Image: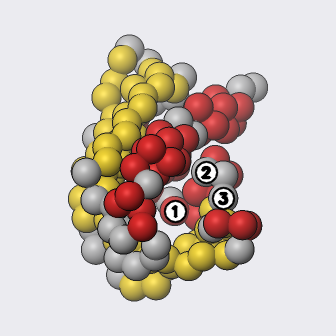
Amino acid sequence: MAIAEYDVVIQRDAMSVYDFLLDARNLPSWRAGVRSIELEAGAAGTKGAVYRQTIAGPGGRAVCGEFQITEARPGAEIQYRALTGPERTHGGYYLSTEGGNTRVRFALECEPRGILARLKSPFRRRMKAEVCQLEQLKSVLEEQAAP
């Protein structure tokens, strides 16, 4: 099993960060490779909601996949799992308040299958790069808060 996690402290309150993360339409603004996203089923931002996203895959070609929100606790956590696509990851965003700031931890877990199971190092590096994109989330949210 491959696991990756990363955390940052964002100078925004927990509900602002939570609301931004819960709105999947914001993913392209901070996650490299996410080209488009749309709601497929359920109510947006609620447990059970299913989203279809197009991401940049190997060689830059578009890869489609779906994910479902499996847990949504306001101001505290959002969990999801991939339903389709090349990698069946599950993970989440975990928020905690630190004064007027919010610590966000992004954790991913995946059991590589097929060829990915034999390519553990590149797979783990890619997962680590994915969670480290929280630095971009921090930049986006803190720029929004700037006067």
Mark 2 or 1, which is nearer the eye? 2
In the picture, the quarter occupied by the C terminus is: top right
Q: Amino acid at mark 1?
A: Ala
Residue type pointed to by label 2: Arg
Residue 44: in sight, yes or no? no
Where does label 2 land, which residue?
Answer: 31
Q: Left or right of 76: which side holds 52?
A: right
Please say if 127 is above or below 50. above
Residue under circle 1? 24
Q: Earlier in the sequence, mark 2 or mark 1?
A: 1
Residue 68 position within the rendered picture, expressed as x and y whole percent measured from the top left? 34, 71
Circle 3 crowding by C-alpha within 10 Å: few under 14, some 14–19, many from 20: some
Q: Earlier in the sequence, mark 1 or mark 3?
A: 1
Which label sits in the foreground, 1 or 3?
A: 3
Residue type, numbered disc 3? Gly
**Disc 2 from disc 1: Cα separation:** 11 Å
Instruction: Assign a secondary structure to mark 1.
Output: helix
